[in-house]
Image (tube, rainbow, N blue to C red):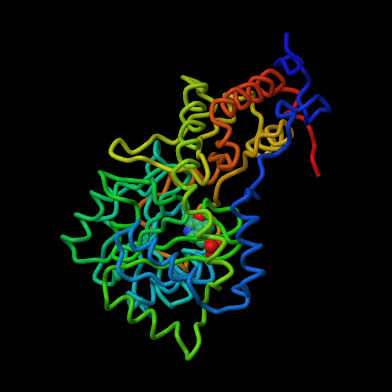
Amino acid sequence: MSENSPTEKPALLGGAPVVSEGPSPWPISDEAIANVFARLQSSGAWGQYHAEHTQDLISNFRQQYQAEQIILTSSGTSAVELALRGLNVSQDDEVILAAYDFKANFTNVVLLGATPVLVDIDRESGQLDVDQVAAAISSKTKAILTSHLHGGMVDMVWLRNLADERDIPIIEDCCQVSSRAVIDGRVAGSFGDVAVLSFGGSKLLTSGRGGAVLTNRADIAQRIRLYNERGNEAYPLSEMQAAVLVSQLDQIEERHRRRLIGAESITEALGSETCLRPFTRCPKAISDYYKFGMWYHETLMGGLSRDLFCRAMQAEGVPLYPGFAALHRIHARRRFRQVGELENASYAHDSVVILHHPFLLKGRQAANQFREALDKIQEHATILKNVHLS
Ligand SMILES: *Cc1c(COP(=O)(O)O)cnc(C)c1O
């Protein structure tokens, strides 16, 4: 038996962790990053507003996303706000979004005086249930805001058709995928009238903070620029950040592939496991993984709560965390309108767990370690259940 056989005590109870080499680093401080900081220092570009790196980044995004207009921003959150402003969302309008989504997307809609209209998610894929969007549309609907979440992909082909029929613009939130995420042969981000990216510290492409708005619609870009440019940009991304981002561009493909292998291997290693089921994938899509989403089934894990399960996995060295809080569960009723009972979003609120992407870069080793940690915890679930953590 290996040192870390499942009979070993869980790390949460003092045993040796499955992952002995420590956490997978993110961001990765490789040679490309070291070089870019050295060049920034010697050229003085670190002190500039905009120069060649900003231009390189914009050209790259233009090409990757087939979007003519690129507005670099200070965060993904500010990019979502600008996208909403670009569509003229204001007082008394409605914006449709999934009841399970990034909190700031909801808050941004409210900030503009509009009402979020919450639609349920799909019970298997964890993504916006596009079949329910039609029922959410009213005469006040100004936009549909949708995010590709936790390794799943929204069926944008279906949503685009509906939006075209009803003449409603889409904001496509691509903060959790790279430019390698593809739906029906088209890059994710090219389906929305406007798309947003995030370069936050934990994201797949990162400069600590930062974001971008992408669009082919000149009217949207112009409205955003009018708001953002006040003789000076209100939500800027610096040349220094752009340089750090540019240095990561040629690694997107390789890292994407490794994450796919990691996620596929874990899915295989889980097999028909019922206590933990990966989000199902959209058949016409190639996904990417900022987080790898799974449904956790507490009762099939000896009654071990999701929080304790995640804490136990983390102690083993597996970066697994509870997912988002569902929006209808954390905001006052008067802030939103809801469509139906939102039971799947409620289920997600209680049972989604998400694995952080750097772990996936280990490929097949990620699957072995994940499975080993899971087996260990499964075996000791009834003891772990009674652990009291501060
Ligand atoms: C990270 C993220 C954002 C924006 O995040 P910032 O930290 O503001 O850059 C928006 N939407 C989703 C789905 C995200 O995951």
- Above or below, 65 against 74 in this view is above
State which quarter of the image contains the N terminus. top right
Front-most of residues 102 and 301: 102
State which quadrant residue 351 falls in.
top right
The answer to whether residue 286 is visible is: yes
Relative placement, left or right, of 309 versus 16 is left
Relative placement, left or right, of 158 versus 239 is left
- Above or below, 263 against 377 in this view is below
The answer to whether residue 327 is visible is: no
Label total for image: 0
Which residue extends farthest bottom? Answer: 231
* Residue at 46 percent of width and 35 percent of height: 260
State which quarter of the image contains the C terminus. top right
- Above or below, 270 against 70 in this view is above
Front-most of residues 233 and 58: 58
Counting from the top left corner in percent of width and height, residue 356 is at 58, 42
Counting from the top left corner in percent of width and height, residue 38 is at 66, 62
State which quadrant residue 55 falls in.
bottom left
Front-most of residues 366 and 303: 366
Counting from the top left corner in percent of width and height, residue 12 is at 78, 31
Relative placement, left or right, of 33 versus 336 is right
State which quadrant residue 9 falls in.
top right
Which residue extends farthest top? Answer: 1
Which residue extends farthest front? Answer: 42
Counting from the top left corner in percent of width and height, residue 239 is at 55, 72
* Residue at 71 percent of width and 29 percent of height: 19
* Residue at 47 percent of width and 31 percent of height: 261
* Residue at 27 percent of width and 68 percent of height: 216
